[in-house]
Image (spheres, rainbow, N blue to C red):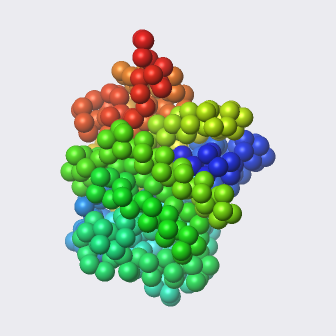
Amino acid sequence: MIGISKLYCGAVEPSDALRYGRTSDQLPSHLLQFSKDKRPVIVWNVTSRCNLKCIHCYAKASESPVNNELTTEEGKRLLDDLAQFGVPVVLFSGGEPLMRNDLLELAAYAVEHGMRAVISTNGTLISAEKARLLKEIGLSYVGISIDGMEETNDRFRGVKGAFKAAIAGIQNCQDAGIKVGLRFTINKLNVGEIPAIFDLLEDMDIPRVCFYHLVYAGRGSKLIEQDLSHEETRAAVDLIMERTKDLYDRGKQKEVLTVDNHADGPYVYLRLLKEDPERAAKVLELLKWNEGNNSGRGIGCVSWDGEIHADQFWRHYSFGNVRKRPFSEVWTDLANPLMKALKNKKKYVKGRCGRCRWLDICAGNFRVRAEAVTGDIWAPDPACYLTDKEIGIQNA
């Protein structure tokens, strides 16, 4: 997760994180990526059910019910363990998390036990009453996925009317006083919608947007050919930086982040090195604290059936099940060779990733993409768009 507004526009300074001691239990949510203890943020896919049919869904969600979802009581035992382990944030996802009848009860339980609860949703099920209830339980944030304007979004989501329902969900959250933001997965089929997403942020006064790079998992693995080329990715990140700065220059500050491609960090730094060297030095310090990809360390995933994964995209490999062992035990058990390696993946990545000058602030980027394309977990991430010159291996 690379904060374009935090880094490029100077919304966060190194002193901001230092003021809280850089420990997960003390840092506000917008600074968590700079924690030094890296207590994991947990994505809990509470259900595999969904009312939409998104073509890029990493969880392959469908409307069909399943019989192996964690029960309410099992979920509370999981949350008890996560709270004791020091997990700062639980992100309730799916499928569509609002299709679980006990979501409000589980989210409230997380908040009561000292964790921040957020949900990742398609937004279509957030009525005014549901938004009011989400506010009452102390939900910290609602991230609503939109893939473009109406025609593009509904094509991606597989259901006509999904865009209008999501917009209504955003409005209902705003009316209830809940912080709400957008989630947008970039690919060839919708990259042209990025300007419209920025317009939507401004028109609806939405405070936050996350632009996700495509990860080849679930149904998203069928979209590899629709991923941006390296040149297209650079152009998209440039556009995101420029539109973010334009908002800042006009006094309309928004939190803008890019997610799932840690090459964005060095790319922002290299651009700032030309434009504002003094700011670039501060950005480099923040990027070192961020440490790049944290799958298996600073982020983890629990599936609807209790399986434990390195992140929400790495669903084909399980470290264990919370029905058999607490998450905290599994997460810290280095007898599993992959778990041990992920705690310090910089030692294992190969090729240009292993020789890259930015390895300490990228950590080898996304292993899931490397595995999807090459079959080798430790191969270079094919989505890294930095040139050999930019990563310092041109003459190596």
Q: Nearer the viewer, residue 40 or 264?
A: 264
Q: Residue at x 65, y 58 (%)?
A: 248
Residue 69 as seen in the image, left or right of residue 238: left
Residue 84 visible in the shown view: no
Name the one closer to the observer, 38 or 366.
366
Which residue is situated farthest in the top direction here?
Answer: 396
Q: Position of residue 345 (x, y in %)?
A: 45, 29
Residue 388, position in %: x, y?
Answer: 41, 23
Of 123 and 73, nearer the camera is 123
Seen in the image, is 38 located left or right of residue 102? right
At a point 51% along the width and 36% down the height, the residue shown is 267
Residue 74 locus on image (x, y percent): 43, 64
The residue at 35%/28% (across/down) is: 380
Left or right: 29 as drawn, with respect to 261: right
Asked if 230 appears above or below 30 in the picture, the reply is above
In this view, 330 is above or below 208? above
Quarter occupied by residue 151 = bottom left
Report the label total: 0
Q: Can the viewer see residue 150 in this picture?
A: yes
Residue 291 in the image: x percent, y percent?
56, 35
Quarter of the image containing the C terminus? Answer: top left
Front residue of this view, candidates 105 and 289: 289
Q: Residue at x 45, y 82 (%)?
A: 168
